[in-house]
Image (cartoon, rainbow, N blue to C red):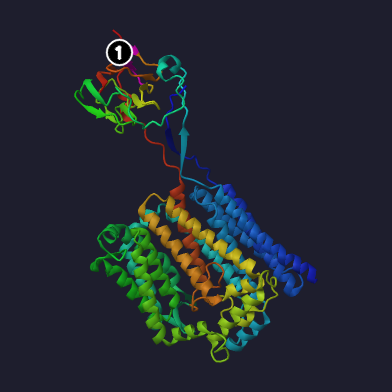
Amino acid sequence: MSELTLTVMRLGFLAVLWLFVIVAVQVIRSDLFGTRVTQRGSRRGGGNASGAPAQAGRQAAAPPQQRQRRGAPTKLVVSEGTLTGTTVALAGQTITLGRAHDSTIVLDDDYASSRHARIYPDRDGQWIVEDLGSTNGTYLDRTRLTTPTPIPPGAPIRIGKTVIELRK
Amino acid sequence: MSVVTNTTTIGAIELPSRRNTELLLLVFAVVIPIFAYANVGLSIHGKLPPGMIAYGGGLAVLAGIAHFVVRRYAKYADPLLLPIGTLLNGLGCVLIWRLDQSQRLQNLAKRQFGHFSESAPRQMMYTALAIALFAAVLLLLKDHRTLQRFTYISMAASLVLLILPVIPGLGADVFGAKIWISVAGFSIQPGEFAKIVIAIFFAGYLMVKRDALALASRRFMGLYLPRGRDLGPILMIWAMSLLVLVFENDLGTSLLFFGMFVIMLYVATERTSWIVIGLVMSVAGAAVVGATASHVKARVTAWLDPFACYTKSGACEQVGQSIMSFGSGGVLGTGWGQGNSDLIGFAANSDFIFSTVGEELGLAGVMAFLLLYGLIIERGVRTALAARDPFGKLFAIGLSGAFALQIFVVAGGVMGLIPLTGMTMPFLASGGSSVLANWALIGILIRISDTARRPAPAPAPSPDSEMTQVVRPS
């Protein structure tokens, strides 16, 4: 066998061996598995233009956990229904309501859905209530919610037989 | 508008099974050894080897069977374990066949035993058996958690496996180390199988005891020192590994078991102190035994300066020849079939097979081989991270830790980094027990990774969501 052929084969073999290693590493790179985290930022409800005039034009966002606005509600009170008297402190986190066991307030109410509604602060500290596609709907005062709506102080939110209010 | 909610949704990635990637890599992993085989034939005999079609076909059929079994019974398993195992095993067969062609080794065998028999066909037969064992593991072991039931039985079984070679009449003293038993004409290395069995015991035991071992401790000089009574198990394993060392003269096996226990203990408890304690104990044990047992002492002398005692002792000559093999290989090696690693003589195709890689493929080849082993270990550790049950986590870590230790011990031994121990390079070295045990190990890792990567079943629909009553306007 000529020297040249053997040299070519020798180098060729090493090249092929390394190619395998590189391909294997590429497979690992594309082989990430586990859980995927999706950021759902900038969620724009079209209806907010009418519903939240207070925040219009204040996009130069203050961070959400700034000092609470004067006169902002500090607690959520259940005023009617089986949970009457329950209060939950409003500390800037989202409050979910429903019959699911992982809700912040677990409603024992036949007319509530498992994930009924949620109450959350927007970036200005204004509390918003949003219906999560419940069967019987969420009512703010007398109107059934169709979009995320800011909660005026003292307005009752009705979910099935349960009524909750935000208080100072 | 500005209603911004930073909500994050965390969901499972819909995972492709990656079986086609595996098949592609597997084809690659079969072609490379065939190329190497042709290369050896061309450089030694000047023509393509006659057995090339049989060898290539055999390897392809075995790989195909293994792939089919994985596709059928472990759909979501890791795509890399099987191809890398196949590649290493195929190249191992080529290395053994290459050393079979050496005139020097043939003469040596004729002088010592009166006849010479080729090792490569035997290795191919063991590979076929090993693939059968691999398939059997995947077929029979539907869920690795069933092994958890055998925690204490496997402790007893591993003790028996470790003691077997010492029993007179059954054990065979081969060149100083008593790690073989001969049954019906076959010599078996029970230590290779004990490696897997003892991992079951460690995983099952540590899963139950890890809270006691992790939490009950005193802080002393930045280290969490465990309570005296919690030191019991580690002392027992230490004593056991020392007994193996003393009675079987086998540094490798005892290091493997103790090291594996320390790794699993560390993973189970997250306490660095166990590693410190383990290192101190193993250094102390090795120092005492190294100073007293004659067989180990010879190995240590050969490690410290192989060229000082080169002409006097066989062990020194082997290590010296091995180091010269690596040296003369250089960066790119001499090419398949053109090295002189057969000068190592006895055990050139088992314990010292990595020297042939070093000489004929050079540093580039050695690095590629070590990376391939590293990839197997990485996939094992990744499997452990992804496993959802603590037993599977510990078991996978134990198996890949043992694999890693074995490679370190063997490669370090032939390169002169640590004293040589009588262990085999997984998949490369000639020997049935090693091939069988390592394919079983890969099979178990594939089973655990299949369980770990299988997409979680969709959550059951919440029963109370249907019970919501609808308000009917009356």
The answer to which quarter of the image holds residue B242 is bottom left
Pick whichever, B434 or B322, lies toward us.
B322
Q: Position of residue B25 (x, y in %)?
A: 61, 54
Relative height, residue B388 to residue B177 (above, below): above
Pick whichever, B285 or A88, lies toward us.
A88
Q: Residue furthest bottom?
A: B312
Query: Residue sitting at 64 percent across and 72 percent down?
Result: B97
Pick whichever, B50 or B206, lies toward us.
B206
Q: Chain of mark 1?
A: A
B153 sits to left or right of B98:
left
Q: Is residue B89 visible?
A: no
Query: Magenta residues, as a range?
Result: A134-143
Q: Position of residue B2 (x, y in %)?
A: 45, 24
B296 sits to left or right of B126:
left
Instruction: State how many labels appear.
Output: 1
Does the magenta run of residues contain B290? Answer: no
User: What is the three-letter code of the residue carrying label 1?
Assistant: Asp
Relative height, residue A166 to residue B6 (above, below): above
User: Label 1: few (<14), some or many (≥20) within 10 Å?
Assistant: some
Q: Position of residue B44 (x, y in %)?
A: 73, 74
Main SS, magenta residues: loop
Q: Position of residue B331 (x, y in %)?
A: 66, 70
Which quadrant would the C terminus of chain B be assigned to in this image?
top left
Q: Secondary structure at mark 1?
A: loop
Label 1 sits on residue: A141
Q: Is residue B80 visible?
A: yes
Query: Residue sitting at 60 percent across and 65 percent down?
Result: B367
B375 sits to left or right of A51:
right
